[in-house]
Image (cartoon, grey):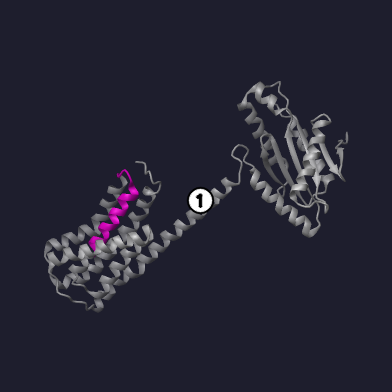
């Protein structure tokens, strides 16, 4: 069954274990109080059903429900009602009564908050009212030493079990949060940083270079004639080209470099603590590697890159002006023939010329 709320079945499985443990431990706690009262056999039968059968029935009931989360809320209210019933059966014996009602209230608060806690209290009150009609209990708040010992497992083990469940849930939520954060900062097609995330890193790199006066270079990469590729071979092939470039970036850049997809067919790279001469060598090798790729679906297709580089300069007012210089270098690489790496140095465009060796 599907849970429209998206959280029912996992909750049902978690509560199944804790409910089973709590009901079994609670059975011995209640039995220690009920035994000296010489209750009828049907009372003991109802206790056995509550302690050993009800947790499994509740699990199956919620599991086959259309909305398991709502079914579990109903089961928790039944738990609370049963708790109130057994408080009356124990003739309001103080220690076990307080422990039982407190444990159930703790569950209700943890699952659905203050409003559901109030609902649980009303269910407990209903259970107590039913017990007054069934058992006509005499108010006997005293707790014997034996009954105290019978309460110790419930008091010691059950909160520890709940703590373990809460710990696992917190760990799971942390992992989910980390995954969501990664997805929010990642471009879905390329798997690289998205535009916003890369710009955030660029701001940080600019601040780092400004504070330490260390070298740093950024690169803008454009796939040459990408619109023609899409128009000629289709968007499926175009997307494959984009993914190929992201793969080449991941395989050929250093661990410290930060690559992202700037938008469309433009990619971007931050090369921290890297002089522009070194960055030019890295980018030219990357350009050459990408240009040598052959595509099985379109063997005749050749794809090249134009790359513009700009090094950090104290003259840059902000990260945007640094990026603007890189964009000018990219424009220079494209306007002088494409399939090349260009650098903007002291405001002048320079084309990278590879050493034939």
Q: Quadrant of residue 111?
A: bottom left
| Residue 80 is a magenta residue | yes
Along the line of sight, which residue is nearer the eye, 42 or 316? 316
**Where are the magenta residues, as a range?**
64-83
Q: Does residue 2 appear to the left or right of 247 in the view shown?
A: left
Residue highlighted by disc 1: 176
Image x and y of residue 125, in percent: 23, 65
Image x and y of residue 249, in percent: 70, 40
Query: What residue lies at 37% left-to-right and 57% top-to-bottom?
Result: 112
Q: Does residue 11 appear to the left or right of 41 in the view shown?
A: right
Specify few, some or many for label 1: CA neighbours under 10 Å numbering under 14, 14-19, or 20 or more: few
Q: Is residue 85 among the parts visible in the rendering?
A: no
Label 1: element kind: helix
The image shows residue 160, relative to residue 142, as above or below, that is above
Q: Quadrant of residue 344?
A: top right
Query: What residue lies at 15% left-to-right and 67% top-to-bottom?
Result: 132
The dominant secondary structure in magenta is: helix
| Residue 188 is a magenta residue | no
Along the line of sight, which residue is nearer the eye, 34 or 174? 174
Q: Quadrant of residue 27?
A: bottom left
The image shows residue 257, relative to residue 133, as above or below, that is above
Q: Is residue 131 among the parts visible in the rendering?
A: yes
Query: What residue lies at 22% left-to-right and 59% top-to-bottom?
Result: 50
Image x and y of residue 339, in percent: 79, 31
Along the line of sight, which residue is nearer the eye, 36 or 229? 229
Query: What residue lies at 45% left-to-right and 57% top-to-bottom?
Result: 168
Which quadrant of the rendered structure holds the C terminus?
A: top right
Which quadrant of the rendered structure holds the N terminus?
A: top left
Image x and y of residue 138, in percent: 14, 74
């Amino acid at each position: 069954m599907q849970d429209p709320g998206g959280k029912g079945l996992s909750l049902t499985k978690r509560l199944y274990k804790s409910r089973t443990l709590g009901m079994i431990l609670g059975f011995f706690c209640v039995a220690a109080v009920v035994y000296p009262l010489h209750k009828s056999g049907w009372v003991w039968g109802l206790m056995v059903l509550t302690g050993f059968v009800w947790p499994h029935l509740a699990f199956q009931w919620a599991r086959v429900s259309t909305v398991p989360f709502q079914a579990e809320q109903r089961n928790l209210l039944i738990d609370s009602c049963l708790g109130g019933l057994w408080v009356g059966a124990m003739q309001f014996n103080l220690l076990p009564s307080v422990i039982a009602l407190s444990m159930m209230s703790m569950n209700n608060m943890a699952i659905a908050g203050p409003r559901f806690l109030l609902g649980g209290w009303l269910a407990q009150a209903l259970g107590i009212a039913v017990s007054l009609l069934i058992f006509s209990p005499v108010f006997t708040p005293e707790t014997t030493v034996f009954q105290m010992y019978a309460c110790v497992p419930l008091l010691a083990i059950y909160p520890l079990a709940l703590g373990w469940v809460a710990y696992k849930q917190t760990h799971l939520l942390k992992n989910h949060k980390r995954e969501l954060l990664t997805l929010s900062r990642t471009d879905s097609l390329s798997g690289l940083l998205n535009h916003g995330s890369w710009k955030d890193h660029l701001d940080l790199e600019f601040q780092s270079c400004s504070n330490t006066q260390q070298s740093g270079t950024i690169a803008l990469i454009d796939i040459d004639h990408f619109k023609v590729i899409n128009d000629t071979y289709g968007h499926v092939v175009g997307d494959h080209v984009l993914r190929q470039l992201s793969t080449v970036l991941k395989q050929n850049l250093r661990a410290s470099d930060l690559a992202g997809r700037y938008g469309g067919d433009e990619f971007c790279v931050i090369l921290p603590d890297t002089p522009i001469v070194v960055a030019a060598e890295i980018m030219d090798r990357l350009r050459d590697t990408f240009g040598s790729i052959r595509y099985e679906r379109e063997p005749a297709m050749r794809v090249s890159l134009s790359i513009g580089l700009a090094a950090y300069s104290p003259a840059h007012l902000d990260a945007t002006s640094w990026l603007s210089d890189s964009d000018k270098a990219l424009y220079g690489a494209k306007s002088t023939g494409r399939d090349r790496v260009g650098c903007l140095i002291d405001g002048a465009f320079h084309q990278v010329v590879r050493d034939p060796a």
